[in-house]
Image (cartoon, rainbow, N blue to C red):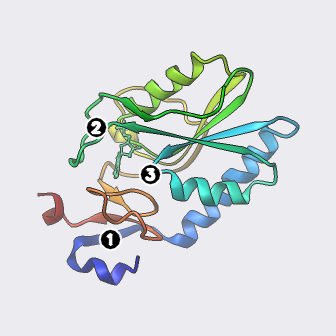
Amino acid sequence: MDSRRMGRDLDKVLLSAEQIDQRLGEMAAAIDADYAGRELLLVGVLKGAVMVMADLSRKLSLDARMDWMAVSSYGSGTKSSGVVRIIKDLDTDLTGRHVLIVEDIVDSGLTLSWLVANLRSRGPASVEIAALLRKPSEAKVHVDVRYCGFDIPGEFVVGYGLDYDERYRSLPFVGTLAPHVYA
Ligand code: IMP
């Protein structure tokens, strides 16, 4: 998507495509080093993590497996409901596997803390988290994010996989929306 099509809906660009690309490269290098000699399963959380998964996985030297889950935590508003429901479960048996959850954003942390507990109950060797974005000011529960891209202010952001009411996911950057969009 071309940002010019957003018109007045875009407030500002928070992270450019170049900044995201560079940071994902650094995260991939850390993951490569930490998981050297081990089999890694990347678990992407649909739909927001699609871009992070696509770009991060291609920067890894190791040959990671990939699987996807879909959970619901947001409706069309901008606040977490705290209620998490599995919409699509994994196809992979996690027993004995090293699992790295790939997420777009940690906001309240409610979704991820639930997901980590859920995946840990399936007998994996380890479960860690890689998230492109984190909003420390919005945290309601502590979530241990092993690989974090950027800490950002507590504003609602879109782009690079993140949506507002299913729009703006295909923007190549992360930006904030003008308040009139969700007022
Ligand atoms: P949490 O449970 O509050 O941490 O929220 C987790 C999910 O809410 C994320 O995976 C996103 O799908 C969505 N979310 C949280 N903050 C934002 C945002 O600023 N923009 C778009 N989606 C968000």
With respect to residue 64, does 56 lie above or below?
Answer: below
| SS of the residue under disc 1 | strand
Q: Nearer the viewer, residue 113 or 91?
A: 91
Place of residue 163 in the rendered image (x, y in percent of width and height, measured from the top left): 34, 57
Disc number placed over residue 48 in the picture, else none: 3
Q: Amino acid at mark 3?
A: Gly
CB at mark 3 closer than 8 A to ligand 1?
yes
CB at mark 2 closer than 8 A to ligand 1?
yes
Relative side of 150 to 10, left or right: right
Relative side of 157 to 125, left or right: left
Disc number placed over residue 12 in the picture, else none: 1
With respect to residue 156, does 88 lie above or below?
Answer: above
Q: Amino acid at mark 1?
A: Lys
Mark 2, residue position: 80
Q: Residue furthest front?
A: 91
| SS of the residue under disc 3 | loop
Pick whichever of labels 3 and 1 is earlier in the sequence.
1
